[in-house]
Image (cartoon, rainbow, N blue to C red):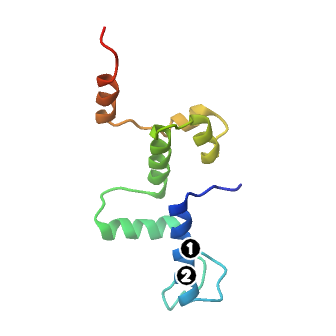
């Protein structure tokens, strides 16, 4: 399936592609090894690479799937958001699946309650 990208995501992938072109110009992959032993070969597990970056950054627990939860949550809470559109971008067939990814922080709930009309 085609996954639409915003300008920031597209720019990040272009930067990554330029790194690959500099280090291993013959590879067709965007996610390619740049270590001399494996240069230009496809990274088999993005999760392992992500995990190593998370450990180096000192983040206690994060997976690529956490990014999916975050992007869906932020998408649903964005101004003028349409949960049906967010669901389609996520590749979900029903809204219940999408809503399982949505998390609402306490401060957001306080903001919602503060904006409710007085009785």
- Residue lying at 33% horizontally and 24% vertically, measured from the top left: 115
- Decide if residue 32 is in sight here: no
Name the residue furthest right: 1
In this rendering, position of residue 28 left or right of residue 112: right
From the top left corner, tell me how far across and down residue 87 is, in percent: 60, 40
Query: Between residues 43 and 74, which one lies in front from this camera angle?
Result: 74
| Residue at disc 2, secondary structure | helix
| Vertical side of 61 occupied by 54: above or below | below
Q: Residues within 10 Å of mark 1 (few under 14, many from 20)?
A: few
User: Tags 2 and 1 in contact by the CB under 8 Å rule?
Assistant: yes
x, y percentage for residue 80? 51, 37
Give the answer, above or below, for where 92 lies relative to 22: above
Image mark for residue 85: none
Along the line of sight, the residue nearer the viewer: 24 or 10: 10
Which image quadrant for residue 20?
bottom right
Residue 12: image x %, image y %? 51, 69
Residue 74 in sight here: yes
Please, is residue 45 above or below residue 35 in the view?
above
Task: Tell me the residue that label 1 is attached to.
Answer: 14
Up-down relation of residue 82 to residue 35 (above or below): above
Callout 1: SS: helix
Query: Residue drawn at (50%, 85%), measured in percent from left and top?
Result: 34
Residue 18 — which label? 2
- Name which residue lies at 52% across and 38% down: 81
State the image coordinates of residue 93 (x, y, percent, origin top left).
67, 38
What residue lies at 30% left-to-right and 57% top-to-bottom? Answer: 60
Q: Residues within 10 Å of mark 2 (few under 14, many from 20)?
A: some
Instruction: Using the numbered discs, state the Cα–Cα distance from disc 2 to disc 1 in whole angstroms.
Output: 6 Å
């Amino acid at each position: 399936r085609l996954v639409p990208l915003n300008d920031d995501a597209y720019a990040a992938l272009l930067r990554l592609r330029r790194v690959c072109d500099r280090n291993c110009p013959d590879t067709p992959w965007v996610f390619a090894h740049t270590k001399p032993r494996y240069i230009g070969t496809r990274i088999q597990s993005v999760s392992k690479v992500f995990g190593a970056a998370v450990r180096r950054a000192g983040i206690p627990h994060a997976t690529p799937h956490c990014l999916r939860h975050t992007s869906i949550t932020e998408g649903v809470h964005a101004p003028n958001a349409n949960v049906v559109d967010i669901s389609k971008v996520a590749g979900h067939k029903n809204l219940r699946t999408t809503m399982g990814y949505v998390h609402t922080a306490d401060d957001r709930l306080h903001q919602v309650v503060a904006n409710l009309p007085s009785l």
